[in-house]
Amino acid sequence: MPSLQELATQLQEKNIALIAHYYTDPLVQDLAKLSQGCVGDSLEMARFGHDHPAQTLMVAGVKFMAETAKILSPDKTVYLLDQDATCSLDIHCPSEAFAAFKAQHPDRVVVVYANTSAAVKAQADWVITSSIALDVVRHLHNQGKKILWAPDKYLGHWIQSQTQADMVIWDGACVVHEEFKAKELAALQAQHPEALTLVHPESPADVIALADIVGSTTQLIKAASTHPATLCIVATDQHILHAMRQAAPHKQFIAAPTAGHSGSCKSCAFCPWMGLNTIEKVQTLLQQPSTTAIEVPAPVRTKAFQALKKMLDFAQQNQQRVQTSGDVEKDQPLFEHTGMA
C-alpha cells in the first residue's frame, strides 16, 4: 500500500481533486488535505469541486454528495469512491413516493434537505442545508407561506419549533442520529457537568433538548474550537471528532452515547455507508478509473440546480445584509445559521 504522500502525489499528477466529508475515515480526510483537496460538509464539497480547476472529482462520501457535485459541475467527471455508499434519508425518500406526497399538498412551498437524491431535489422549490434551514423557513413563514418539508423529521420538527412555521413533514430519519438516547446522554452529562454538549439537529427532540449548542457539522466544529469549554460531548457521527481534535488539539472530546447498557453499544455513531470510503478504494480508483462516473440527466440537473441556486442566492443576500457592531459577543447571533451544511 502506497503512503499517504505517494497517493497525494498521484492525485495531483493526475489532476484529480479528492473531496471528503467530515464523516469519512480520518485517513481519507488526511489524504484529501495532503493532496490539496477538500474536507468539508456536503455543500462545501460541491462548491470546492465547482471552483477547483481539476476536471475530475473523486468524492469520498455518499451518493447524494456526488450528485450535488455533478449538479454544480456538469462538465466535470465525478466519481464516488463506492457506488453502494448511500444515505438512509435518501433511501427512505424515493422520488416517486415523494411526488405523490407533494401532489397531496399543492398549496405548499416544497423545501427539501440536501440529503436527498437529485430526482427529489428536482421536485423542490428550495434545496437547503442544515446551517441555513432556519433562516429560509423563517423567511418563508414571514411571507405567510406554508411549507412541505422532507426528508428528516427530527430536523423538520426542530425548525418548526424554532420558527412556528406551518409545516407538513415527511417521515424520515438518519440511522446514525436517530440512535442517540436522551437518558444515556443525561447520565453522561451528570458525570461531566463541566462539558459542553454539541448536538446535530437530525437527532431526536429529547436529545436536542439537552444540547448547549445545536448545529450543522461545520457549526459544531467551529463551536468546538472557539468555545472556552475544554471538554465536549458530541452527538453526531464520531468521525467528526478527527476534525475537532485537529481544530482544538488541547481539548477532550467524548462521543455521545447511542444506546443501552453492558454489552450493547453506547457510542457506535458511525454511518455504515460513510465507512465504505477507504484509502484502498482511492488507490484502486487511481489505478483503474471507473467507467461508472456519476451522471445526472439534464432535465433533472437543471431543475435541481434552480432549487440549489435559490438557497445560494439567499445565503449571499443574507450575508450582504448583515451589519456588525464591532462587538464579537454581541454579533455572534448574526452568524449562527450562515455556515455550511
Image: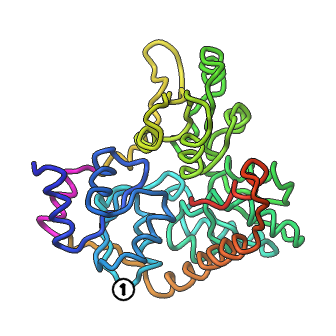
Q: Residues within 10 Å of mark 1 (few under 14, many from 20)?
A: few
**Percent position of residue 214, x then y:** 67, 43
In terms of secondary structure, where does tag 1 sit?
loop
Could you tell me which quadrant the C terminus lies in? bottom right
> Foreground residue, 225 or 109?
225
**Percent position of residue 339, x then y:** 61, 59
Q: Is residue 284 magenta?
A: yes
- Magenta stretch in the rendered image: 278-289
Is the magenta region chiefly helix, strand or loop? helix
Residue at the spot 63% in from the left edge and 32% down from the top edge: 197
Identify whether 331 is placed above or below 120: above
> Foreground residue, 82 or 12?
12
> Foreground residue, 71 or 259?
71
Q: Quadrant of residue 12?
A: bottom left
Identify whether 310 is placed above or below 183: below
Q: How many marks?
A: 1
**Percent position of residue 141, x then y:** 85, 66
> Foreground residue, 330 or 167?
330
Identify whether 195 is placed above or below 9: above
Q: Quadrant of residue 296?
A: bottom left
Residue at the spot 81% in from the left edge and 50% down from the top edge: 162
Identify whether 1 is placed above or below 101: above
Seen from this angle, which residue lies furthest front?
Answer: 326
Q: Is residue 279 magenta?
A: yes
Q: Quadrant of residue 184?
A: top right
**Percent position of residue 57, x then y:** 31, 71
Residue at the spot 33% in from the left edge and 44% down from the top edge: 26
Kind of residue indicated by mark 1: Asp
Residue at the spot 66% in from the left edge and 27% down from the top edge: 182
Question: For mark 1, what is the residue?
Answer: 75
